Image (tube, helix red, strand yellow):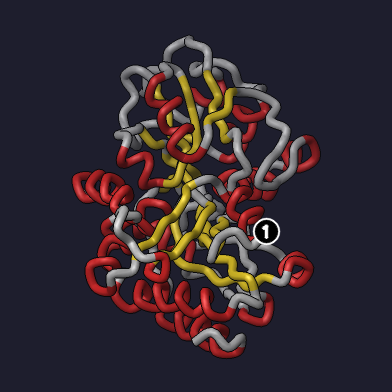
Amino acid sequence: MKVFLKLALALALVFSFTHADAADMLNGAGASFPYPVYSAWSYDYNKVTGVQLNYQSIGSGGGIKQISARTVAFGASDAPLAPAQLKKDSLLQFPAVIGGVVPVVNVPGVKAGELKLDSDALCRIYLGDIKYWDDGRIKSLNAGLRLPHSEMTVVHRSDGSGTTAIFTTYLSEVCPVWKSKVGAGTSVNWPAGIGGKGNEGVANYTKRTAGSIGYVEFAYAEQNKLAYALLKNSAGNFVKPSFETFEDAAATGNFDPGKDFHLWLVNAPGKKAWPIAGATFILLAKEKTDSNKKVVKFFDWAFNHGDKKAKDLVYVPLPSSLKNKIRAYWKTHGIL
């Protein structure tokens, strides 16, 4: 899977060949969370149809701004927009795929899946209350694991980010002090740490900085060979990030087309559910019927042919029942 991911990301540059006709180009921008799977889908779609996707991984905040300004055919955001905001900006919204945000660490001697964290510890780390890796609150969760007395470097996103929205929505739900002091959103006033641009930036900072902790979409942890932490979920179980635990979280979701599919999947109740899961969403301008049809054609193809690639990259494809709800939503708005 790791080899495939590297290939998919390298092939992202193939999206725009110099001889491409503008009529065969789709321009989108936004979330870095789904960039690996969009890259893989786009490469295969181009081989079948000749249509190329130029997708800019600039963060959810940038994607929302660009589609609101009508400078791209579609925007992408991991933070679902509420129906009132969609109405204000005359936008449509539907989910494309589901994944997980994972804490990643660079602690000498600590391998992937060895470190355990609960919601309180993770909250206190990002508040800046926990400053050293051998803090008693971390040691109490990790009996037998040697943790150094070294200072933590907390890494977060510097750009407007749906990954941040998922992460901070989770922290706000499980940690009252976080909710009152910081809150949730694509951008927040971070109490501690340094910022990296995109999932790529956070992954690179964490990889280069000994003693660091960050949060990224799982594919970026795999690509960069970063050590992920186990998390204690709402059922009281320590779980690792995986297709199965993301899928268990996704199974709790009731996406309502009447609310433009607005839904968070954090802190899901499943016994094996990964606690920081989320869907990533596509945003369309209501009035752009012709370009919307081209975008919808691509995602309908991905819904029919892209599940295996999504699974290879540890994303959860949407269930058939939800895909059919989305197709009905498209028809309602005259774009299928």
For residue 311, say whether it is visible.
no
Q: Position of residue 320 (x, y in %)?
A: 40, 81
Residue occupying image coordinates x 28% and y 70%: 50
The amino acid pointed to by label 1 is Ala
Query: Closer to the camera, 29 or 113?
Result: 29
Lateral position of residue 86 relative to residue 301, left or right? right
Q: Position of residue 38 (x, y in %)?
A: 38, 59
User: Could you tell me which residue is drawn at 33 percent across and 55 percent down?
Assistant: 15
Residue 57: percent from left, percent from top: 47, 47
Find residue 220 and report its image quarter: top left
Q: Residues within 10 Å of mark 1 (few under 14, many from 20)?
A: few
Quarter of the image where one finds residue 122: top right
**Image position, residue 333 (x, y; %):** 61, 86
Q: Nearer the viewer, residue 2 or 330?
A: 330
Q: Residue at x 52, y 18 (%)?
A: 152
Q: Is residue 206 above or below residue 306?
A: above
Judged left or right of residue 113, residue 118 is right
Give the tally of numbered discs.
1
**Residue 281 appears in the picture as rendered:** yes
On screen, residue 182 versus residue 245, left or right, reads right
| Residue labelled with disc 1 | 69
State the SS at label 1. Answer: loop
Q: In the image shown, does 114 or 47 lie closer to the viewer? A: 47
Name the residue: 30% across, 54% down: 17
In the rendered view, tell whether residue 273 sits above or below residue 331: above
Residue ranking furthest to the left? 3
